[in-house]
């Protein structure tokens, strides 16, 4: 039994085109596009017809950086794969790439198997995995080759968090050399964690315990220094580099310089750095704890440089780094000691809407919106053109988006499993109306019609910017 859906009358927006076209979907894939009102489009018949008149028809978002059920600081991220992928769908995201974690002393395979077990049968949308490499040794390096062959083609390392995920320069260089050989992509959390730990200790000794000091000790210069060092190590190894959650203008400058030299260096930023600042970390009482994440929020003047980087393509991707911890009972663990506040913020449901607001405000174009939220992450992580575009043969991950609807962001109405919103009270223009995942309606006119287990694991090819 083949199933057919036709979406009529919308403006199809991809990273490369904007066309008034009808979209024919067959057996979970895009079968054809034809200009609306033409005989070719009128001839299509289908069991399901969706009227997208006055709406955008866009590819489902690809969020290349999420942490569902992630253990951190003695607790766990509040979203499970079930709740987190459902919330992603509500926000117009149809694919996530989450992070499996290697334990120190353990094998990559053990970590990957554990994450497969968490996700399998629970996801509302499709998912893939990156691998966090916490313990570089001969066995780890051999395993990296095997993982690339089976579709886990990116490996994250940390210059931060000594004693937890931290890798020293020698370990980073070895992993980069391996990636240079097997086609993998090294993703880097670029902050000088050794130096930051000294500043944390000194701040606490001075009695500076409030959440705002989290931002003050994790200095922009230490993000820039680590970014520079990661670039040079990648250059020595002959490997590509992807720097995650870039927050500081000085780090953007390091990436721009490397790219101007022709190096295969890429950067990602996140909505929290584009829309929030140290003003939020300084909110009175203990409210600032809601905004503790690493890299930290920066003073407001950094935002303009991040937007500029997105326009000039020195930053290619906007992901969320979705890692939610409830204010009550989780963030509160750090009362009296900011270093004990779990690092992470919710956002998987808000990304597409926040970036559309940037279109409304003239910061980016519609096509750039789709580029940084859908197409570029799909290309970066070996999912394109299966994901990230609307074209014949692509998975029918399609969002009907109402660019005129108005909404106010609130924890009262969001679907993430967390007790606050980082964007509480923010008014946005634009809203997801209907979401298809591989042709199946997950959100239907603002009703959830999906189910756990629809989403399937999606192996990835290597970074498509390197071919």
Image (spheres, rainbow, N blue to C red):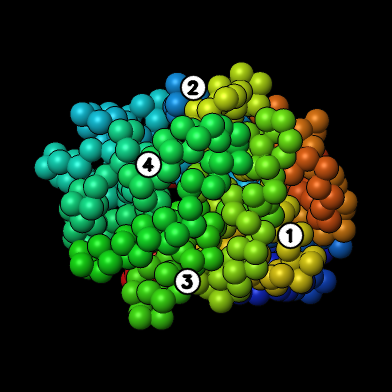
Q: CA distance from mark 3 to mark 1?
A: 25 Å
Q: CA distance from mark 4 to mark 2?
A: 24 Å
Residue 382: percent from left, percent from top: 41, 57
Q: Nearer the viewer, mark 4 or mark 1?
A: 4
Check the image and report above or below for 7 versus 367: above
Say which element carries label 4: helix
Check the image and report above or below for 351 versus 123: below
Q: CA distance from mark 3 to mark 4?
A: 26 Å
- Mark sitting earlier along the chain (2/3): 2
**Is residue 348 or residue 200 the one in the foreground?**
200
- In the picture as drawn, the residue positioned furthest to the front comes out as 206
Residue for badge 2:
75
Rendered image: mark on residue 253 = 3
Residue 136: percent from left, percent from top: 20, 42
Q: Are marks 4 and 1 in contact (CB under 8 Å)?
A: no
Residue for badge 4:
198
Q: Nearer the viewer, mark 3 or mark 1?
A: 3
Q: Is residue 206 left or right of residue 88?
A: left
Residue 42: percent from left, percent from top: 79, 66
Q: Nearer the viewer, mark 4 or mark 2?
A: 4
Q: Residue at x 65, y 42 (%)?
A: 281
Q: Residue at x 73, y 63 (%)?
A: 358
- Mark sitting earlier along the chain (3/4): 4
Q: Are marks 2 and 3 in contact (CB under 8 Å)?
A: no
Residue for badge 1:
356
Q: Are marks 3 and 1 in contact (CB under 8 Å)?
A: no
Residue 56's quadrant in the figure? bottom right
Q: Nearer the viewer, mark 1 or mark 2?
A: 2
- Mark sitting earlier along the chain (4/1): 4
């Amino acid at each position: 039994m083949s199933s057919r859906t036709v979406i009529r009358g919308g403006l199809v927006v991809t990273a490369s085109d904007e066309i008034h076209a009808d979209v024919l979907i067959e057996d979970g894939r895009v079968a054809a596009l034809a200009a609306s009102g033409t005989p070719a489009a009128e001839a299509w018949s289908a069991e399901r017809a969706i009227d997208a008149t006055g709406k955008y028809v866009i590819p489902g978002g690809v969020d290349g950086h999420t942490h569902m059920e992630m253990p951190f600081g003695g607790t766990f991220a509040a979203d499970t794969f079930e709740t987190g992928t459902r919330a992603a769908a509500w926000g117009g995201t149809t694919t996530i790439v989450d992070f499996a974690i290697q334990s120190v002393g353990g094998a990559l395979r053990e970590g990957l198997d554990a994450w497969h077990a968490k996700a399998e049968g629970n996801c509302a949308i499709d998912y893939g995995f990156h691998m966090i490499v916490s313990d570089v040794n001969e066995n780890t390096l051999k395993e990296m080759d095997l993982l690339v062959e089976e579709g886990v083609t990116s490996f994250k390392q940390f210059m931060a968090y000594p004693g937890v995920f931290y890798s020293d320069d020698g370990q980073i260089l070895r992993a980069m050399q391996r990636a240079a050989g097997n086609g993998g992509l090294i993703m880097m959390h670029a902050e000088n964690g050794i130096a930051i730990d000294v500043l944390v200790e000194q701040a606490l000794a001075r009695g500076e315990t409030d959440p705002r000091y989290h931002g003050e000790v994790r200095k922009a210069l230490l993000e820039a220094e680590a970014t520079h060092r990661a670039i040079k190590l990648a250059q020595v190894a002959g490997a590509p580099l992807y720097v995650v959650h870039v927050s500081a203008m000085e780090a953007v400058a390091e990436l721009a310089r490397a790219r101007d030299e022709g190096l295969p260096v890429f950067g990602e930023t996140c909505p929290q750095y584009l829309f929030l600042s140290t003003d939020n970390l300084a909110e009175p009482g203990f409210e600032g704890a809601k905004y503790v994440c690493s890299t930290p929020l920066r003073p407001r003047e950094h935002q303009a440089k991040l937007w500029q980087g997105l326009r000039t393509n020195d930053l290619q991707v906007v992901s969320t780094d979705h890692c939610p911890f409830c204010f009550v009972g989780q963030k509160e663990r750090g009362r009296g000691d900011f270093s004990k506040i779990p690092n992470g913020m919710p956002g998987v449901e808000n990304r597409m809407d926040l970036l559309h607001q940037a279109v409304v405000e003239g910061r980016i174009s519609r096509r750039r919106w789709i580029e940084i939220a859908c197409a570029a992450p799909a290309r970066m992580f070996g999912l394109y053109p299966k994901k990230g575009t609307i074209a014949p043969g692509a998975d029918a991950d399609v969002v009907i988006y109402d660019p005129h609807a108005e909404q106010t962001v609130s924890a009262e109405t969001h679907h993430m499993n967390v007790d606050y919103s980082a964007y509480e009270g923010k008014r946005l223009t634009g809203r997801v109306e209907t979401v298809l995942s591989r042709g199946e309606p997950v959100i239907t006119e603002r009703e959830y019609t999906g189910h756990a287990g629809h989403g399937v694991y999606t192996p990835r090819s290597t970074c498509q910017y390197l071919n």
